[in-house]
Image (spheres, rainbow, N blue to C red):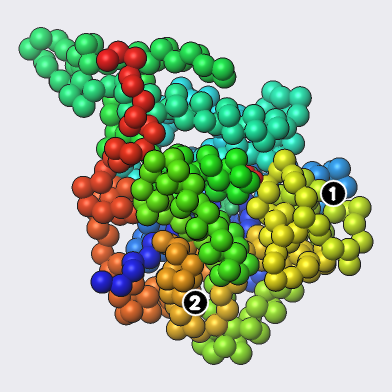
Amino acid sequence: MKKQIHLNGFIQNSPSPHSTGLWKHEKDQGTSHNSLAYWIETAKTLERGKFDAMFIADVLGTYSVYENSHDAAVRGAVQLPAHDPVIPISAMAAVTEHLGFAPTISTTYAQPYSLARQLSTLDHLTGGRVAWNVVTSYLESEAVNLGLSGRLPKELRYDRADEFLQVAYKLWEHSWEDDAVVYDKENDTFADPGKVHPINHEGEFFSVPGPHLVEPSPQRTPVLFQAGSSPKGRDFAAKHAEAVFTKNHSLDGLKLYTSDIRRRAEEQGRNPAELLIFPMILPIIGSTEEEAYAKYEELTNHVSYEGTASLLSGHTGIDFSQFDPDQYIEDIETDAMQGNLDMYGKDPNKRWTLREAIKNHGLGNGTVKFIGTPEQIADEIERWAVEGDADGFNIAQTYSPGTFTEFVDQVVPELQKRGIYRTEYEGSTLRENMFGRGRRHLPADHPAKKLVPVHS
Ligand SMILES: Cc1cc2nc3c(=O)[nH]c(=O)nc-3n(C[C@H](O)[C@H](O)[C@H](O)COP(=O)(O)O)c2cc1C
């Protein structure tokens, strides 16, 4: 059997969040992100295309590094308005049966006790179709609005995230036993108190006695997604994540990433093949190659320089208003998103000027573009999966949800024809669709399973 690929749809509760300025395009409906109809249509489209999940990115602040102001972000709708990623999920779950949902939630600002409850509730309501994109957040504007005097240093953010997950694992995996709920009407007992345990977590960042507020949900722990790219972020992903997202310009860049992250997973005592790797791609589809490239140029015309400069400044933590557009972007360390800076400062194939980086970053947040006919795009997908060792792809959009619709109608049938993509969902939970039937829960080699419960 040929290597099978998985697909996620990359979206955010904001107008044209990943292609800056595309809200102006005649085909874009992203400005309707404040309506349930938009989410319902998008979810149904992804399920028609047999996608594993809708991956919903999120930020809790404005992009205000550029010119030390949020004005450019406000003017250009740069991930602003930024609506909540979790709230549309119940409505989408009601109109779909198989599609998973992966909201982004920050361990720097949430509390594990309440977040565990929220995601367990959603896992119940969706019948086991929830994932969590675990982020530590990178914007200063998030920190100062959420009770901190400034952005925490990256090391500390990841240390907190690590303990956050330990607390959440204890609640999800070790608080309620499988048979705790007995529904015993004769003995007036809904659940057996001897099988609902406190977790008594005492750590550096959190003190959580428990017990968990929700009885075991179909998956217990939601599927864990992560996208760390700094060394500390990669170690964190290799330890905890079941799937990782990455952004690359080139197949060579992807190869370096996949071999590195699988090595790190092995060092953590995990099966490296079970860490699914999803590079992000932006498909630009035409009926001929020429048409696709003409479409790319036309889409690029909608990208705003200032809006994208503001996005890139927020992603990298560098105020690019201070730069000459023809200045080269250097290889330095950042406390914001290392991967976004490395794409331009560490590219082995090219030195990027700011102007070039902005042109690139404006469509699909700078990720690789697959431009061509459906067959050519399927060729590239196959090549990146086989040579780059990718397990799936995170599909970004130019105009929304039209990019998904075109991909589902034109590229998905081509992938299915080649025998590299499902024609039916494998299981009923998201984890089963990603890892195979019967795999509702985390595997035994995952750190959540190795925690020794306090009550044992
Ligand atoms: C494809 C992709 C999507 C991401 N989505 C988000 C997001 O929605 N919200 C967020 O705060 N960070 C997001 N990130 C950032 C990372 O998860 C990570 O927290 C950030 O890159 C900083 O850590 P690092 O320097 O280790 O990468 C994303 C990164 C990538 C590559």
- Residue behind mark 2: 380
Give the camera-side residue of 194 and 64: 194
Residue in the image at 33% along x and 67% along y: 4
Residue 154 image point, x, y percent: 67, 35
Task: Give percent across and percent down for residue 87.
Answer: 48, 40
Residue 347 vertical placement versus 196 (above, below):
below
Looking at the image, which residue is at 45% across and 43% down?
Answer: 267
The earlier-in-sequence mark between 2 and 1 is 1
Which residue ends up furthest to the left in the rendered image?
A: 186
Q: Amino acid at mark 2?
A: Glu
Residue 391 drawn at (x, y percent): 41, 61
Taking 387 as reference, is 294 above or below it? below
How packed mark 1 is, by other alpha carbons closer than 10 Å (few <14, some 14-19, many 20 or more), is some
In the image, 157 versus 138, the foreground residue is 157
Label 1: which secondary element: loop
Residue in view at x 53 percent, y 54 percent = 260
Q: Could you say which quadrant of the image residue 82 lies in?
A: top right
Q: Quadrant of the rendered structure where residue 453 is? A: top left
Residue 22 appears in which quarter of the rendering?
bottom right
Q: In this figure, which residue is indicated by the disc labeled 1? A: 319
Q: Position of residue 188 (x, y in %)?
A: 14, 10
Image position of 396 with respect to 139: above or below: below
Mark 2 CB within 8 Å of ligand 1? no
Q: Nearer the viewer, residue 210 or 269?
A: 269
Q: At label 1, which amino acid type do we have?
A: Asp
